[in-house]
């Protein structure tokens, strides 16, 4: 699992994310402050330095949707296992 995803899940487990009308306030791990995560069009954006530098999902964005993240990872693992089983049976036939 990507480090940012993992750290986002850790933030979510702590339960300190605040949902506002149009955004989420996600606690900083290094400061006594919060970062704002919101949707702009169909893209999630955060005002943390990591997101502003990379323009990719940061741990604060990942922390918003831990259940969705886990669902996709579990689905991918199940599909991979099913495909490998299918492939193994296909090769043997």
Image (cartoon, rainbow, N blue to C red):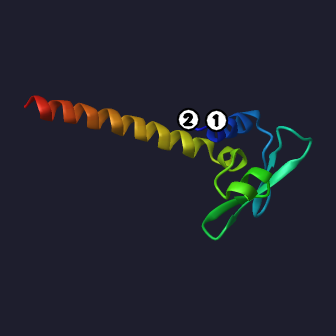
Label 2, label 1: how far apart the Cα atoms are: 6 Å
The quarter of the picture where residue 87 lies is: top left
Mark 2 or 1, nearer chain start: 2
Residue farthest toward the right in the current orientation of the protein: 32
Q: Which residue is mark 2?
A: 1
The N terminus - image quarter? top right
Residue 45 position within the rendered picture, expressed as x and y whole percent measured from the top left: 70, 60
Q: Are marks 2 and 1 in contact (CB under 8 Å)?
A: yes
Mark 2: few/some/many CA within 10 Å (<14, 14-19, 20+) = few
Q: Is residue 21 above or below residue 75?
A: below
Question: x, y percentage for residue 4?
Answer: 66, 41
In this rendering, the answer to whether 65 lies above or below 77 is below
- The residue identified by callout 1 is 6
* Residue in the picture at 37% in, 35% down: 78
Where residue 44 appears, as percent x and y from the top left, is 66, 60
The image position of residue 70, as x and y in percent, is 54, 39
* Residue 40 - label: none
């Amino acid at each position: 699992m990507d480090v940012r995803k993992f750290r986002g899940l850790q933030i979510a487990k702590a339960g300190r994310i605040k949902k506002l009308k149009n955004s989420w306030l996600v606690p900083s791990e290094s400061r006594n402050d919060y970062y704002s995560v919101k949707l702009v069009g169909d893209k999630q954006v955060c005002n943390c330095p990591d997101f502003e530098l990379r323009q990719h999902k940061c741990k604060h964005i990942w922390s918003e949707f831990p259940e969705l993240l886990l669902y996709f990872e579990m689905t991918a693992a199940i599909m991979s296992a099913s495909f490998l089983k299918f492939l193994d049976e296909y090769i043997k036939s």
